[in-house]
Amino acid sequence: MGRKDSTVVPLRAVIGVLGFLGIVFQYVLKVTLSVAIGGMVNQTTNGQVDTSTCPLPDGTTTGESITEEGEFDWDDEIQGYILSSYYYGYAATNILGGYAAARFSARWVYGLGLLIAGVFTILGPVCAYGGPVVFMVSRIIVGIASGVVIPAMHVLFAKWFPEHERQRLTGAVFSANYLGTVLSMASSGTMVKNLGWTSVFYIYGGITTFLILPWVYFVYDDPESHPRVSEKEKTYIIENTKRNRIESSDKDPDTLDKKDLIGNPWPMILTSVPMWAHVLIMFATGWVNYTLLSELPTYVGNILHYDIDDAGLISALPYLFGWISCSVYSFLTQKFTEKGMRVINTMRIWDAVACVGSALCLLGVTLVDCDVTLIIVLFVLTMVCRCAVYGGSYMNHLYLFPHSYGGAAGLALTGANVSGIITPIVTSAFVSGRQTVQQWKYVFYLAMGISAVPYIFYLIFGTAEDQETPWMEKRKLKRKQQSEP
């Protein structure tokens, strides 16, 4: 039986929504420990807290602070390694996930990643009782599984969404990480306080595991293989993506060899200076993101002295406004390009906001001391600025490598996520046993520098021009010269 000529809801919209939900809960699994660990750890065993902190919200002294009695005697250093353990696995599989999704099946790479991450999150409490090392191993496995999700979605994005829709939808779909962060931070503290710390692992792990069912039913690797896509939508997608040009090139030996390119893109990608400029931007904005993501609940609890429930809600605010701003940036980018602005110029403008703007906001945090309201506003503005990268160069690799985007996406996301390994360890080195305003200023100074400096490199070397066509032409010319007598 043939496909229908039309459907009520375009399948690419359904795929976008399911991809969005998967990323939401992948981020919930990532973030929830940052809040939940406050209810897991016996705070009275965490060493002496310096008195150079902000006044308590009720105006009492630091010494009158009520401690939280958790079950585990993990000091700040061990907590830093536990929080970073997820990112060892997460960063390690970004490249592999992008490559496997492009070479084999983005549908199954994404789906199995969600399933495994959900199952091992459910097992988290059992692993925690087994000791910090066992718990770290479980978090590494969750990170490994989660690390393939977004690269696989990048591959599906390129196959299912026409080029003129991508700029508008990039922020809407990939801002899911911010909604996941908001959901996790806003609810985890309440769940820990009322249901116990194990509840966040069981509930969120269970929901993530369940998502595999609608994903497998609705999502396929491309329109050609989907049994329920309409002929109208399939034709529209193929005609408005670059895949029709790639298919034509497969028939012409003098053009790009698609299979060869996807099979071994690394000499091209790793020697591309514009790609490394893109990776540095991803690392810079990733550092700001993970500094707030992993450490803001700790800062709000130890320096501003809010309990675990309020600390989670306050820490969620920057990500709530960040989530809203992502779609705004993408919408404005589309409008700018429709009016004739070059893509690279929109990238440079929004990357300036993301890198330099967030650095200036963090500088403000270090200057206002203990004005709690202003500190929270500045953290919100930091994340709003940081999210400008979604209107900027977040999808730069699709422009640089329009055919071998899987590997390029993996490298770019690795650049962003490797900072998640480093930031908890670096932060704990600054503040372990020294939870003071001054020590936290050093954390923010470092984030400022890492955020701002790569933008200079991007201004010089960044581009949105196709890098793989010239590279392949040079390679073919070299082969031709070598084959001549």
Image: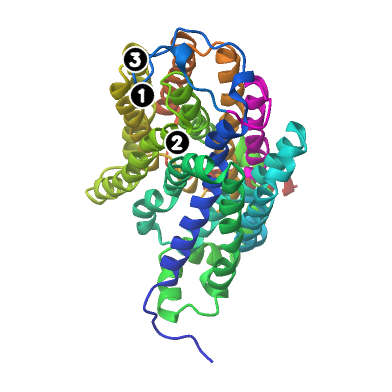
Which residue appears at 38% of the width and 48% of the height?
Answer: 171
Q: Residue at x 46, y 45 (%)?
A: 187
Describe the element under mark 1 as helix, strand or loop: helix
List the residue tagged with mark 1: 356
- Numbered tag placed on residue 370 in the rendering: 3
Badge 2 amino acid: Asp
Rendered position, 132 above or below 209: above
Q: Position of residue 249 (x, y in %)?
A: 56, 63
* Residue 414 visible (yes or no): yes
- Which stretch appears magenta? 69-95
Residue 253 percent coordinates (x, y): 62, 61
Q: Nearer the viewer, mark 2 or mark 3?
A: 2
Q: Residue sitting at 31 percent across and 30 percent down? A: 381
Secondary element under disc 2, as helix, strand or loop, is: helix
**Local crowd at mark 2 within 10 Å, few (<14), some, or many (≥20)?**
many
| Residue for badge 2 | 309
Q: Is residue 86 magenta?
A: yes
Q: Where residue 344 sits in the image (x, y, percent)?
A: 36, 39
Q: Quadrant of residue 92?
A: top right
